[in-house]
Image (spheres, rainbow, N blue to C red):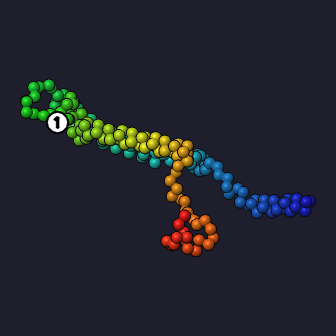
Amino acid sequence: MPVFSCLRTRAVAGVRATLAPTKNVFKQGTQVRNMAGDKMVVRPGTYQGQRVKDNFIYFTALGAIPLALITAYVNVFIGPAELREIPEDYVPEPHEYYKLPVERFFARIVESPEKVHERSLYYVERAEKMRQNKLLYKKYKELSQQRRDDKGWYFVPHPGSVENRSNYGSDSPANVV
């Protein structure tokens, strides 16, 4: 054991000796430039951060200002919908039930409420069928464990005696049980 401790101290000393010249390379302090007696501290620039903020504000304004102008124009000059008598043979469209013109526009673009309702009913029905199937499968598992009456697809019958094994599968009277 004393031999290993001597080798360890020599190995550590050798590693330290090889790393000693490069030890100061990894230390970095603040760079300082001396210019006519004044000191200028070199620090990272803020150009990229300012550019990102400027681009965000620009593109937000590029989309928000026209949208706000169009919305104001529509609400001021077209205005909300008014109630009127409906002719007997006229069936209103689903988007005509909304009061504001912007809401009517979006209701015309987006799917009708009936379609959305039918889709949600489909998802509810599908979830209910899956729930019923899970309950049925759970009941099947419980009953098959209680009654021990699984289908034995894995069961392979074999002949009872060694003599009959050579003739297994043939229709000879010796194989009939």
Residue 72: quadrant of the picture:
top left
Residue at image position (68%, 57%) is 25
- Give 123 or 139, whichever is nearer the viewer: 139
Residue at image position (52%, 51%) is 150
- Give 14 or 158, whichever is nearer the viewer: 158
The image shows residue 132 at horizontal and vertical percentages of: 42, 40
| Circle 1: element type | loop
Q: Is residue 106 above or below residue 164?
A: above
Question: Label 1: which residue?
Answer: 93
The image shows residue 35 at horizontal and vertical percentages of: 57, 50
Q: Is residue 50 above or below residue 104?
A: below
- Give 66 or 104, whichever is nearer the viewer: 104
Q: How many marks?
A: 1
User: Looking at the image, can residue 20 be seen?
Assistant: yes
Amino acid under label 1? Glu
Q: Residue furthest right?
A: 2
Q: Is residue 27 above or below residue 171?
A: above
- Give 72 or 105, whichever is nearer the viewer: 105
